Image: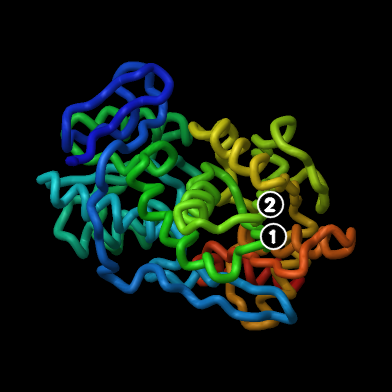
Amino acid sequence: MEWRLQCPKCGFRGAPGEYHPWCPKCGGPLEIVGATPRYDSIMGEGSTPLVDFNGVLLKLEYLNPTGSFKDRGVSYSLQLARDLGYQCVVVDSSGNTAISVAAFAGRLGLEAKVYIPRGAGGGKRALVKALGARVFEVESREEAAEASRREASRCFHVAHMTSPFFLEGMKGLGLELKAEAEGADVILPVSSGSLLLGVYRGLREAGVMGFRLIAVQSPRAASLRGRVRVLGEIGGSSGRLLDALVVKSPSRLSEIAEAIESSGGGVVVVGDSAVREALGELVRSGFIVEPSSAAAWAAFRLLREQGVLRRRVIVVLTGSGLKYPEVLAREATGS
C-alpha cells in the first residue's frame, strides 16, 4: 500500500504519495498510513558509538556528520524530498537543524533556504552559508517559522517539529538502542521532542519493554512541567547556555507527555549553573559536547544522588561542542 498522510485530530486524509508538512485543514501534526520508503545512510549518519563512561552508557549523537542528532531526520526527509521531485527545501532554525539541512541539501543537489532568527549564533549562521544554503535573517523565531511556512507552497518544508517523516528518520536511534534499553533509564534533552519521540517509536517498534524516558529541559522552555512528573530541578532559573532547548510550545507536546508517562518517566529541569559544571566534567573527560548535551549529564548526576536510577542508564549526547568554541573556553574551563 502506498503511503498517505492523515490527521488524527481532524480526520484529514491526503492523497497517496502527497506530502504535507502539517495538516492543511487544522494545522496539526500528521501521521503516515501505509508502507514508508526505506533510505540508507548517505553521509555516515546514524550508527553512532555507544560507550561506557564510569558505568553509564553514553550515546554519542554529536558524532553524526554535522555534529547533531538532527542528521537522522534531515537525511530521511531530504531523500524523500528528492524522490518526490522537489528542487528546493526550506526550514526555520536557529542552529543544528539549519546546518544539517544545508549539508544534506548540498549532498543531494537541492537548493536550501534557511530562515534564522536574529541573534542566533554567528558561528552557526556562517557555517550554514558556507555549506551553500541561502540564509534569510528575521527578527524572531516566530517570524522565521512564518516565513518558512510561506515557502512551503513550492519548496519541501523540513517540518522537524511536526513531520512524521522526520520522526521516521529519528526512529533509527531507538532501533540502535534496542539491545541496551530493556529495563533502562534513557535520559535525553527535549525541546521540539523529535529526539524523544524517535527513540520511543523506535524502541516500541523493536518490541522493547520496561524502559523509562527521562526528559531534560531548560527553565526557559520547560513545556513538560505540569504535564509529567517533575523528578528534579537543579542549576537555577537561567537557561542562557541552552540555546538548543528553546521551544516553549512543541507541536507534539501531548504525544511527548504521553510517551513519558506511559514509560513511567518524568522531566528534570536544568539551569545554567548545573550545565556549566556538567559541561566541564564531560569536556575534560574527552566528550566535546554542546551545553544542551551537558544538561542531560547534569540531570543524570542529580538523579544518581537521589538514588532513583535503575541499574542501567543511557544518556544521549546530542550536539557537538565544536560549534561552541568560545562557550567551551569560557564555561567548561571557568576562564
Residue placed under numbered mark 1 in the picture: 185
Q: In which quarter of the image is residue 28?
A: top left
| Amino acid identity at mark 2 | Ile
Residue placed most toward the observer, 208 or 272 = 208
Q: Choose the circle earlier in sequence order: 1 or 2.
A: 1
What's the residue at 64%, 41% (across, down)?
262
Disc on res. 96: none
SS category of the residue bearing label 2:
strand
Q: Which colour scheme is used?
A: rainbow
The reply to whether callout 1 and callout 2 are in contact (CB within 8 Å) is: yes
Comparing marks 1 and 2, which lies closer to the viewer? 1
Q: Residues within 10 Å of mark 2 (few under 14, many from 20)?
A: many
Residue 294 screen position, x and y as percent: 67, 63
Q: Residue furthest left?
A: 85
- Visible in this render: residue 120? no
Residue 77 screen position, x and y as percent: 28, 50
Q: Residues within 10 Å of mark 1 (few under 14, many from 20)?
A: many
Residue placed under numbered mark 2 in the picture: 214
Q: Is residue 307 above or below residue 198?
A: below
Quarter of the image where the N terminus is located: top left
The answer for how far apart the CA atoms under marks 1 and 2 are is: 7 Å
Residue 218 screen position, x and y as percent: 68, 46
SS category of the residue bearing label 1:
strand
What's the residue at 26%, 66% (across, down)?
40
| Amino acid identity at mark 1 | Asp
Q: Is residue 19 left or right of residue 228?
A: left
